[in-house]
Image: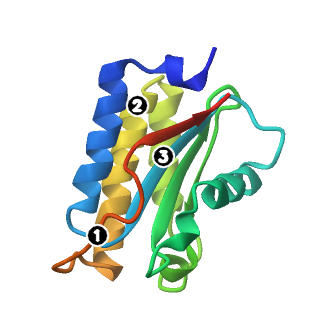
Amino acid sequence: MSPSSYFTSEQKATMVAAIQEAEKNTSGEIRIHFDNHTKKEVLDRAAEVFAELKMHKTALRNGVLIYVALQDHRLAILGDAGINSKVPANFWDAIKNRMVEKCKTGLICEAVCEAAIAVGKQLKTFFPYEAGDVNELPDDISFKD
């Protein structure tokens, strides 16, 4: 089953809306990616996806990836150099841990949406929205079989 077919059209639209809502108050950029499976360590695969999605190309290096390997029940939240230079180690763990709990009950869409909103709040702290801010990365969700 393709990771894209795991979600209904409404769920996909809800996740995109969560990204857009989260980005309203920050110059930061959020992407969501789903794989079916990865043979790599979850952070290594998330870093690969981060590069594939060109998330390191933002002006302030403030992109954040929410990565989920559906069949493996693994996830990661990965921030770019700009945000990681401003936050303490293990900064994303609280959001990730809430995602894990929600995913355990099968509420993956809800977990991802809540995580996107929480990431947006954290980004706002360090990268508030400024007049003329441009959406540097697409808000769509990416999938890979």
Q: Amino acid type of disc 3?
A: Ile
From the image, state whether disc 2 or disc 1 is nearer to you: 1
Does 122 sit left or right of 74 as displayed? left
Residue 79 visible in this rendered orientation of the protein: no
In the picture as drawn, the residue positioned furthest to the left comes out as: 131
Q: Residue at x 28, y 73 (%)?
A: 124
Q: Secondary structure at mark 3?
A: strand
- Quarter occupied by the N terminus: top right
| 11 over 60 or under it: above or below | above
Determine crowd level at label 2: few under 14, some 14-19, many 20+ residues with C-alpha closer than 10 A. some
Q: Amino acid type of disc 1?
A: Val
**Disc 3 or 1, which lies upstream in sequence?**
3
**Distance from Cα at disc 2 to Cα at disc 1:** 26 Å
- Quarter occupied by the C terminus: top right
Counting from the top left corner in percent of width and height, residue 95 is at 45, 55
From the image, state whether disc 3 or disc 1 is nearer to you: 1
Does 72 sit left or right of 116 as displayed? right
From the image, state whether disc 3 or disc 2 is nearer to you: 3
Q: Secondary structure at mark 2?
A: helix
Q: Residue at x 61, y 20 (%)?
A: 2
Residue 134: assigned label: 1
Q: Nearer the viewer, residue 89 or 15?
A: 15
Q: Which residue is mark 2?
A: 109
Counting from the top left corner in percent of width and height, residue 82 is at 50, 81
In the picture as drawn, the residue positioned furthest to the bottom comes out as: 85
Q: Which residue is mark 3?
A: 32
Q: Residue at x 42, y 26 (%)?
A: 107
**Distance from Cα at disc 3 to Cα at disc 2:** 11 Å
Q: Amino acid type of disc 2?
A: Cys
Residue 21: assigned label: none
